[in-house]
Image (cartoon, rainbow, N blue to C red):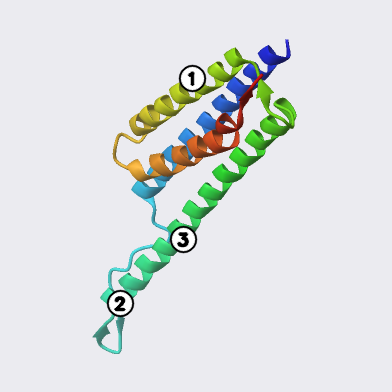
């Protein structure tokens, strides 16, 4: 009974992590498409000098800094949620020695492989192949955390 409950919780965690990583990939895609943190400058003249190119460069730099800040916040949120959910599952669900049945280990490994392939395929479809870096970053963090924290640490009885 405990193994069935663990597998059910495993699939719930995979669903939550897929939802979050795909959602943040799409959010980053939309942010790239429509991001203008600071407005544009069309005409900036001081004492007869046209400073529009210089001011436009500073405005672009400010937008880039804010965009990078949003990106880092998104990556931090994804990484923190992955760590919290997966470490809770590893230490509470699997126990200290992480020993599971052979069929349960097989379910974890196969579901991880299917999850990884599906996550990247759906992610590229969601962003319409226009921003592959957000898919690679967010889904890659999720897949790497799952692999390192749970799947590679399992031991058979």
Instruction: Tell me the residue at 31%/34% (across/down).
Output: 128
Q: CA distance from mark 3 to mark 1?
A: 40 Å
Residue that carries the numbered disc 1 in the rendered image: 110
Above or below: residue 104 compared with residue 135? above
Viewer-proximal residue, 78 or 58?
Answer: 78
> Left or right of 146: which side holds 136?
left
SS state under label 1? helix
Viewer-proximal residue, 130 or 79?
Answer: 79
Instruction: Tell me the residue at 65%/21% (across/down).
Output: 9
Q: Quadrant of residue 108?
A: top right
Looking at the image, is mark 3 or mark 2 earlier in the sequence? 2
SS state under label 2? helix
Q: CA distance from mark 3 to mark 2?
A: 19 Å
Residue 145 horizontal/vertical position (percent): 54, 39
SS state under label 3? helix
Residue that carries the numbered disc 3 in the rendered image: 66
Residue 53 horizontal/vertical position (percent): 26, 74
Could you tell me which quadrant the N terminus lies in? Answer: top right
Q: CA distance from mark 1 to mark 2?
A: 55 Å
Viewer-proximal residue, 36 or 76?
Answer: 76
Residue that carries the numbered disc 2 in the rendered image: 54
Residue 52 horizontal/vertical position (percent): 28, 75
Badge 2: few (under 14), some or many (20 or more) residues near its Cα, within 10 Å? few
């Amino acid at each position: 009974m405990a193994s069935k409950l663990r597998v059910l919780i495993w699939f719930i965690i995979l669903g939550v992590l897929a939802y979050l990583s795909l959602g943040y990939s799409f959010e980053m895609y939309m942010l790239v498409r429509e991001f203008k943190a600071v407005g544009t400058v069309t005409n900036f003249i001081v004492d007869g000098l046209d400073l529009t190119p210089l001011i436009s460069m500073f405005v672009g730099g400010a937008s880039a800094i804010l965009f990078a800040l949003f990106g880092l916040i998104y990556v931090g949120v994804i990484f923190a949620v992955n760590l919290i959910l997966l470490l809770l599952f590893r230490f509470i669900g699997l126990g200290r020695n992480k020993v599971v049945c052979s069929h349960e280990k097989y379910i974890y490994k196969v579901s991880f492989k299917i999850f990884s392939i599906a996550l990247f395929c759906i992610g590229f479809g969601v962003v319409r192949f226009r921003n592959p870096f957000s898919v690679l970053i967010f889904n890659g963090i999720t897949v790497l955390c799952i692999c390192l924290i749970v799947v590679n640490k399992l031991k058979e009885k």
